[in-house]
Amino acid sequence: MTTPDPTTRRAFIACLALCPAAGLARAAREPLPLLLAQEAPADIDPAGYLVSEKYDGVRAYWDGRDGRDGRSLRFRSGLTVAAPAWFTQLLPATALDGELWFGQGRFDALSAAVRRHKPDDAEWRQVRFMVFELPGGEGSFAQRAARIEALVHQAGHAALVAAPQVQVAGAGALQRRLEQVVREGGEGLVLHRADAPYVSGRSAVLLKLKPEQDAEGQVIGHVGGRGKHAGRLGALRVRTARGVEFLIGTGLSDAQRASPPPLGSVVTFTYRGITPGGVPRFASYQRLRDA
């Protein structure tokens, strides 16, 4: 086999770049413009929101194009999910956004199952597509949620489920609901403005609420402040028992910024979940541990 000369090679590459099929292949690998949640404040008032469980599954988007040819189920990354034909055939000709889910506490098994290049039929019989949004759908979220229920009822298949959306009366009831979900093995709650039109990107119309956790870390550095904190402590650099280092810049009083916990001391901080790199999310200083 001969190697093409540079001119032929450049022409071939240019053809690929201009070819519509190549463009579609690249587009399919771009992250999808879905609605993403912001963190909810711990004391949020749930009035005006519909509340559902935050499923520990894999985000999935069904494009719902008319006609069987060309329709696909995709990850948030844009890559196609290798789902069995019987699974996609039960989905309606309407765009759907949701989570592929095995059940509480089974994320690792679910993730492995739906990412196989060759789907395992027995595994997919356990998968549920928990639908919580109609991308591009008209009306308020409350109206779209009602339409999701109707679509799921019409499909009549156990694998397609409308994520239950409920109203919660007050911050106390919301906290009790959060504690119940966590006790049962869930991640937390999602709050969606009932009156919100469909939008994409990270938006305040969609909030995620997770339980606050606490842990300890050793102070290994003091980072100077800026702006209103100029001339005093801006953040503590801490290291956990697992060797993870990060900054804590919130939760500190003016007195603590003026006279911060000394290097080598151990502090307690609160956080909400862990990043893939093991760093506590939204870490906030709580107190200096007693000696």
Image: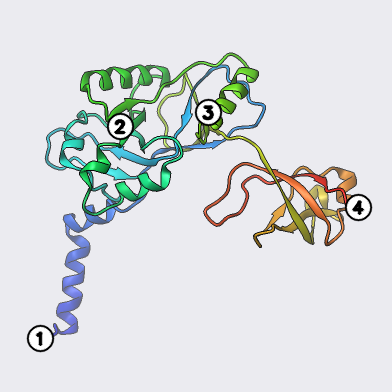
Please name the amino acid that badge 4 sits on: Ser
- Observer-side mark, 1 or 2, equals 2
Q: Position of residue 128 (x, y in %)?
A: 31, 33
Classify 48 as above or below 72: above
Left or right: 109 in relation to 6: right
N-term-proximal mark, 2 vs 3: 2
Q: Please say if the residues under marks 4 and 3 sit with CB atoms less than 8 Å apart.
A: no
Can residue 238 be seen here? The reply is yes
| Residue 173: quadrant of the picture | top right
The x, y position of residue 216, in whole percent, is 73, 50
Counting residues from the start of the chain, the first of labels 1 and 2 encountered is 1
Earlier residue among tags 4 and 2? 2
* Classed neighbour count for the residue bearing mark 1: other residues with Cα under 10 Å, few (<14), some (14–19), many (≥20): few
Residue placed under numbered mark 2 in the picture = 96
Q: Say what secondary structure mark 1 lies in.
A: loop
Asked whether 215 or 150 is in front, the reply is 215
Q: Amino acid at mark 3?
A: Val
Q: Which residue is mark 1?
A: 2
Residue toward you, 162 or 116: 116
Residue behind mark 4: 259
The quarter holding residue 241 reads bottom right
Closer to viewer: mark 1 or mark 3: 3
Residue drawn 65% across the image and 19% down it: 172
Residue 200 located left or right of residue 39: left
Classify mark 3: helix, strand or loop: helix
Please name the residue that numbered disc 3 is placed on: 181
Is 123 above or below relative to 138?
Answer: below
